[in-house]
Image (cartoon, rainbow, N blue to C red):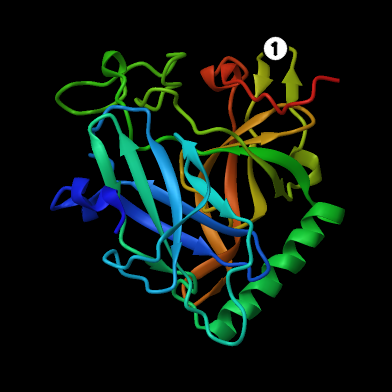
């Protein structure tokens, strides 16, 4: 039996707020997670994705999937796990902090969809991704805002827990050290053509009168208000606001319309480094 089990505190189930599994039979299953906002162990957070066919924390068939990831929000299982006609796949996360090791509850790879619905959803996502990548979409990055982790106490009000310094280059206005997870690449957005460029007014400088735009995007990864989408070609950065489901199945969003708001070039988010960004 894995040694971590004896280190898991009695009420550790609450630590993982949500785990989402986006299955892909031949390899490439994506697992995303969030931690409870009040989880206060100091960082760094090291996550290990595990796989099992039994699907209980007491099972002895849990195996590590890939290498551990640090301070991230997703992991990829690039191996094919299923053969035949039965889906027994389950995933869970281990998190190691300086104070302990904790295990999430197992999550079935089918999520909330039946196998038939999941196959249909996968095809819808495949076709939409192809359309965005080859025709309608602009390529970019998603910066997932941190909503848990080590609090940057200098920027957070002790009583209200509200951020009091939106210009901080340590937490980037999120209140958590680091501000955002590492950029997620190849995230496409379909923007209206007339709003894809910044408008300059000689009297007022850069204006944002028209720069609240709807963008059609995939529902994977799951976007939340406060995340940021970055145009790969221009480095223009947009804040994610209202999210409307355009295509969903059994409550699972597949295609969404996201209200993007242009972030002013003075915003601290432009100082968040993206190593993959090509400087041509």
Near-viewer residue (134 or 77):
77
Q: Which residue is mark 1?
A: 203
Residue occupying image coordinates x 39% and y 27%: 174
Q: How many marks?
A: 1
Q: In which quadrant of the rendered image does the N terminus lie?
A: bottom left
Element under disc 1? loop
Q: Residue 174 vs residue 247: left or right? A: left
Near-viewer residue (125 or 19):
19
Q: Residue furthest front?
A: 1
Near-viewer residue (271 or 211):
271
x then y, percent, for residue 197: 77, 31
Q: Quadrant of residue 108?
A: bottom left
Q: In which quadrant of the rendered image does the C terminus lie?
A: top right
Dot 1, crowdedness within 10 Å: few (<14), some or many (≥20)?
A: few
Residue occupying image coordinates x 20% and y 45%: 7
Q: Residue 173 vs residue 123: left or right? A: left
Q: Quadrant of residue 247?
A: bottom right
Q: Is residue 76 above or below residue 153?
A: below
x then y, percent, for residue 275: 67, 24
x then y, percent, for residue 25: 63, 71
Residue occupying image coordinates x 33% and y 38%: 96
Residue occupying image coordinates x 27% and y 49%: 3
Q: Residue 219 vs residue 200: left or right? A: left
x then y, percent, for residue 97: 30, 34
Q: Is residue 138 above or below residue 232?
A: below
């Amino acid at each position: 039996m894995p040694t971590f089990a004896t280190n898991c505190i009695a009420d550790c189930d609450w630590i993982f707020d949500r785990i989402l599994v986006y299955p892909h039979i031949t390899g490439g299953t994506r697992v995303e997670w969030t931690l409870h906002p009040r989880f206060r162990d100091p960082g760094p957070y090291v996550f290990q994705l595990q796989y099992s066919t039994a699907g209980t924390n007491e099972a002895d068939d849990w195996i590590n999937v890939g290498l551990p990831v640090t301070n991230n929000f997703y992991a990829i299982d690039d191996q094919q796990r299923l053969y035949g006609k039965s889906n027994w796949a389950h995933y869970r996360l281990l998190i190691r902090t300086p104070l302990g090791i904790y295990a999430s509850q197992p999550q079935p790879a089918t999520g909330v969809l039946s196998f038939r619905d999941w196959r249909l959803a996968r095809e819808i996502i495949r076709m939409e991704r192809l359309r965005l990548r080859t025709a309608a979409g602009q390529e970019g990055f998603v910066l997932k805002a941190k909503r848990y982790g080590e609090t940057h106490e200098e920027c957070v009000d002790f009583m209200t827990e509200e951020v009091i310094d939106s210009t901080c280059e340590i937490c980037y206005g999120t209140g958590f050290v680091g501000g955002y997870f590492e950029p997620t690449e190849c995230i496409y957005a379909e923007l209206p053509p007339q709003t894809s460029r910044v408008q300059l007014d000689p009297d007022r400088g850069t204006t944002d009168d028209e720069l609240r735009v709807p963008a059609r995007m995939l529902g994977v990864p799951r976007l939340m208000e406060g995340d940021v989408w970055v145009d790969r070609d221009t480095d223009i950065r947009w804040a994610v606001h209202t999210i409307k489901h355009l295509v969903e199945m059994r409550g699972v969003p597949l295609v969404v319309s996201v209200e993007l708001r242009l972030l002013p070039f003075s915003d601290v988010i432009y100082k968040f480094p993206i190593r993959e960004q090509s400087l041509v």
